[in-house]
Image: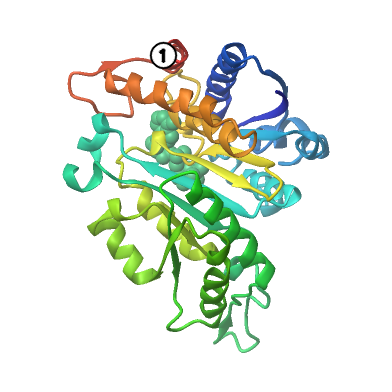
């Protein structure tokens, strides 16, 4: 297959780990006989420095023409004091909007070697392997009005969803469950919120299209508790924007290693933007010590979700697992009797095991 990929290194360690993504993709191309072409563009603080805006027009144009986009990270103290329209994060929010990405996927899976760093008991997290599908374009973050009212003593935020917005994210979640263990937990607050009642209705309707997937509804407060009590009970979780924001941060601590978590932001036709969950880590930037595994695992998500290359994605994921199992790790991970190495060598190891 022939695919064109835009690379957006961004800021801080993004500049270093994007090279790791490219290295594993070149190995995949060679091993499976694909042709991947690459184009690099600026976003975030680096783009402010070079182009005077966190999201240059040429970056948007390139991303719109690409089959998929890989992003390192944006932000850093250097740009903290800029006016809000020049903040690096505006680049990321802007490109998600320009591309119409409405589904945020965050898989959370514990690596045996790393379970010692989890705040939870090892036996609780060792079997956890879940995927959070978060709606990204609606809900409280975008509803209007959202303002302090005239007297200054009252405020309003609006939780607004249209049926078609719920339908498309629920479809995405069912499709994701089919690629996994065929179980879907829909999280809402249907005992209180009108929006949640419509959400539940849509899930009930949609489930007849996916008879091979089992469905369960769960209130968000219960889901927050169960994620800690028994994370292994979950396969795919689907939920609205703010519940998803909160639950995905909660779930990300299960594994005890921020440097290991990938994410995908998608629209229906398969175009997507893939990035590590962690930020630009300015405190360690430029030292070749960043953990490249979240970035590398994000490229695996890209192969699976944008290109339908399941075998290729598994090849990367298995290699990462093996390398970690052997004890190789970057400075951020604590592994007893492990072998500490840097960004470049960690990447080489993954490529070698692929
Ligand atoms: P942002 O607002 O961009 O999310 P943040 O301050 O919340 O930034 P990170 O940039 O992710 O978070 O950094 C949090 C801590 O984790 C830092 O100490 C950073 O060095 C460390 N860290 C994050 N990602 C990595 C990585 N890939 N490898 C090593 N350390 C990392
Ligand atoms: Mg952060």
Residue 13 visible? The answer is: no
Point out residue 71 in the picture as x, y percentages from the top left corner. 61, 34
Q: Is residue 266 above or below residue 201?
A: above
Residue at the image position 71 percent from the left and 49 percent from the top: 94
Q: Does 26 sit left or right of 319 as displayed?
A: right
Residue pushed farthest bottom? 151
Q: Is residue 236 above or below residue 43?
A: below
Residue nearest the viewer, comparing 184 with 254 = 184
Q: Does 149 sit left or right of 180 as displayed?
A: right
Residue nearest the viewer, comparing 74 with 232 = 232
Question: Which quarter of the frame holds ligand 1?
Answer: top left
Residue at the image position 28 percent from the left and 62 percent from the top: 226
Figure quadrant of the N terminus: top right
Q: In which quarter of the image is residue 192?
A: bottom left
Q: Is residue 313 above or below residue 137?
A: above
Q: Does 8 sit left or right of 329 as displayed?
A: right
Point out residue 95 in the picture as x, y percentages from the top left corner. 71, 45
Q: Is residue 244 above or below residue 114?
A: below
Point out residue 332 in the picture as x, y percentages from the top left corner. 33, 29
Q: Residues within 10 Å of mark 1 (few under 14, many from 20)?
A: some
Residue 310 visible? The answer is: yes
The way the protein has been coloured in the rendering is rainbow
Q: Mark 1 points at which residue?
A: 353
Secondary element under disc 1, as helix, strand or loop, is: helix
Residue at the image position 60 percent from the left and 15 percent from the top: 26
Point out residue 61 in the picture as x, y percentages from the top left corner. 82, 38
Q: In which quarter of the image is residue 156?
A: bottom right
Residue nearest the viewer, comparing 56 with 351 = 351
Residue at the image position 52 percent from the left and 80 percent from the top: 197
Q: Does 52 sit left or right of 150 as displayed?
A: right
Q: Quadrant of residue 155?
A: bottom right
């Amino acid at each position: 297959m022939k695919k064109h990929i835009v690379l957006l290194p961004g800021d801080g360690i993004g500049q270093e780990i994007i090279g790791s993504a490219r290295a594993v993709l070149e190995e995949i191309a060679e091993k499976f006989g694909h042709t991947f072409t690459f184009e690099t563009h600026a976003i975030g603080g680096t783009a402010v420095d070079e182009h005077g805006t966190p999201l240059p027009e040429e970056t948007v144009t390139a991303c719109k023409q690409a089959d998929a986009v890989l992003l390192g990270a944006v932000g850093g103290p250097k740009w903290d004091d800029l006016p809000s329209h020049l903040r690096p994060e505006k680049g990321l929010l802007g490109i998600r909007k320009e591309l119409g990405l409405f589904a945020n996927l965050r898989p959370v899976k514990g690596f045996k070697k790393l379970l010692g760093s989890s705040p939870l008991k090892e036996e609780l997290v060792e079997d956890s392997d879940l995927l959070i599908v978060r709606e990204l374009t609606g809900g409280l973050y975008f509803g209007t009005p959202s303002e302090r009212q005239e007297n200054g003593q009252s405020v309003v935020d609006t939780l607004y969803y249209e049926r078609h917005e719920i339908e498309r994210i629920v479809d995405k979640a069912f499709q994701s469950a089919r690629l996994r263990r065929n179980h879907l937990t829909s999280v809402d607050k249907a005992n209180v919120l009108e929006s949640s009642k419509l959400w539940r209705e849509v899930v009930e309707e949609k489930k007849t299209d996916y008879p091979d997937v089992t469905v369960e509804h769960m209130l968000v407060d219960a889901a927050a508790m169960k994620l800690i009590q028994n994370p292994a009970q979950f396969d795919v979780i689907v939920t609205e924007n703010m519940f998803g924001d909160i639950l995905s941060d909660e779930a990300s601590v299960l594994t005890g290693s921020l440097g290991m978590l990938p994410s995908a932001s998608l629209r229906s036709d398969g175009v997507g933007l893939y990035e590590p969950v962690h930020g630009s880590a300015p405190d360690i930037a430029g030292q070749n010590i960043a953990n490249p595994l979240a970035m590398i695992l994000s490229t695996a998500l890209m192969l699976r979700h944008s290109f339908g290359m399941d075998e290729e994605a598994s090849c990367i994921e298995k290699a990462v697992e093996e390398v970690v199992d052997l004890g190789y790790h970057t400075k951020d991970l604590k592994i007893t009797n492990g072998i500490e190495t840097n960004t470049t060598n960690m990447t080489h190891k993954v490529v070698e095991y692929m």
